[in-house]
Amino acid sequence: MYSFFFKRVLDFSISFVLLILISPIFLGLILFLTIANNGKPFFVQKRPGKKEKIFSILKFKTMNDDTDANGELLPAEDRITTVGQIVRKTSMDEIPQLINVIKGEMSLIGPRPLIIGYLPIYNEVQKTRHDVKPGITGWAQVNGRNSISWTKKFEYDVWYVNNLSFLLDLKIMGLTVKKVLQKKDVNLSEEVTSEYFNGKN
């Protein structure tokens, strides 16, 4: 009953209230990032959701689009703006995903939505991570994230899918808040600092 009804009710209610409460911060970040990124405060990218349905994930844009003499984007470390560093360090770049949650594309808790390019190389077990909605934070994020292998991360994702419950979601939320407050391993997106998943690592 929780996964089919109450989880969605909680996702919507909590996300809606949070957006209202943090609206001054939300609007302030939009202003600063608009200035820092030449009018582009948001990063939008297609990601697979539940049942691999594609949706557009929203994040605050922490890197500009500066290019070299050949028109190629500069390395990521050279494009992170000053305000972007602060936003990323505190995981505030994930705030716009509350809109994805309200729209029903994501959940507060669930496996992180990764890039579409990984879909063809998941094995049958790893694919089950898409049996639930992706989350802003998840079981893998509170259990090491970038200090563990992709294989282990997917094991955590699949374990979450098979053991989804209100108490587990509550535990993950508590651990996420703790990590953010401690500024410990707080960036929730694997693709930011992890090596590219090749189906074996």
Image: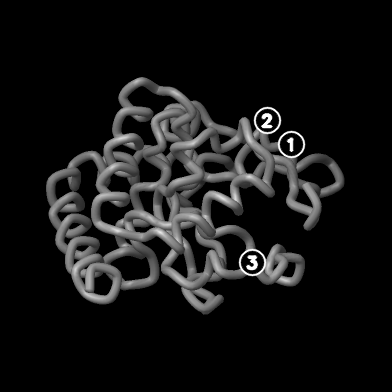
On screen, residue 64 versus residue 85, left or right, reads right
Mark 1, secondary structure of its residue: loop
- Say which amino acid is labelled 2: Asp
Mark 1 to mark 2 CA distance (whole Å): 5 Å
Q: Position of residue 116 (x, y in %)?
A: 65, 67
Residue pointed to by mark 1: 75
Which residue: 45% across, 28% down?
89
Q: Is 22 situated above or below 53?
A: above
- Say which amino acid is labelled 1: Pro
The answer to whether mark 1 and mark 2 are in CB contact below 8 A is yes
User: Mark 1: few, some, or many residues within 10 Å (few <14, many ≥20)?
Assistant: few
Q: Is 55 situated above or below 177?
A: below
Which residue: 44% across, 23% down?
184
Numbered mark located on residue 78 in the image: 2
User: Mark 3: few, some, or many residues within 10 Å (few <14, many ≥20)?
Assistant: few
Which residue: 30% across, 34% down?
177
Q: Toward the viewer: 165 or 78?
A: 165
Mark 2, secondary structure of its residue: helix
Numbered mark located on residue 125 in the image: 3
User: Mark 2: few, some, or many residues within 10 Å (few <14, many ≥20)?
Assistant: few
